Image (cartoon, helix red, strand yellow):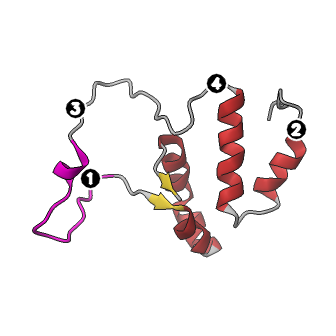
Amino acid sequence: MKSFTNGLRKPEAIQGWIYENPDNVALAVKAIDLYKMENGIKIGSKQKAKKSQAPKSSAADMVSTRTTQIDAKEPKIWSQREIAKLSMAQFDKYESDIDQAIMEGRIVD
């Protein structure tokens, strides 16, 4: 991890947020936000896909009022609390999905 330009935090301390506290999602998210801030990446932004995407519709259009089924094609939106409650075995199972969700900004408070 690069050294932080503001001089307020040392990279080793921030690495400790992740490696020494594997169950603390809030610290991991904060470390990622700091990394993005230092590298000029807009926090909460999604990386642009190389292929053209279908036009976005409003959130209201995506919510069904007639059924409680979830469309399996939509990627899962994870909450920090949900991730924190996972056992190590469950986290190992979903780790790649969680990493992708972090990169795409699909982690909510």
Q: Mark 4 sits on what residue? A: 40
Q: Which amino acid does label 1 sit on?
A: Lys
Residue drawn at x 53%, y 41% as measured from the top left: 103
Q: How crowded is mark 2: few (under 14 residues within 10 Å), some or many (20 or more)?
A: few
Q: Give the mark nearest the N terminus, 3 or 1.
A: 3
Residue 59 on image: x %, y %: 25, 48
* Element assignment for label 1: loop
Distance of mark 3 from mark 2, alpha carbons? 42 Å
Residue 108 on image: x %, y %: 49, 56
Distance of mark 1 from mark 2, alpha carbons? 42 Å
Q: Mark 2 sits on what residue? A: 8
Q: Please report the bounds of the magenta region as a residue range.
A: 58-74
Task: Classify 23 as above or below 104.
Answer: below
Q: Mark 1 sits on what residue? A: 73
Distance of mark 3 from mark 1, alpha carbons? 14 Å
Front residue (pair 27, 94): 27
Front residue (pair 43, 95): 43
Q: Nearer the viewer, mark 4 or mark 2?
A: 2
Q: How crowded is mark 4: few (under 14 residues within 10 Å), some or many (20 or more)?
A: few
Q: Give the mark nearest the N terminus, 4 or 2.
A: 2
Q: Give the mark nearest the N terminus, 4 or 3.
A: 4
Q: Which of marks 4 and 3 is in front?
A: 4
Q: Which of the numbered marks, if any, corresponds to residue 54?
A: 3
Q: Residues within 10 Å of mark 3 (few under 14, many from 20)?
A: few
Q: Which amino acid does label 3 sit on?
A: Ala
Task: Classify 83 as above or below 96.
Answer: below
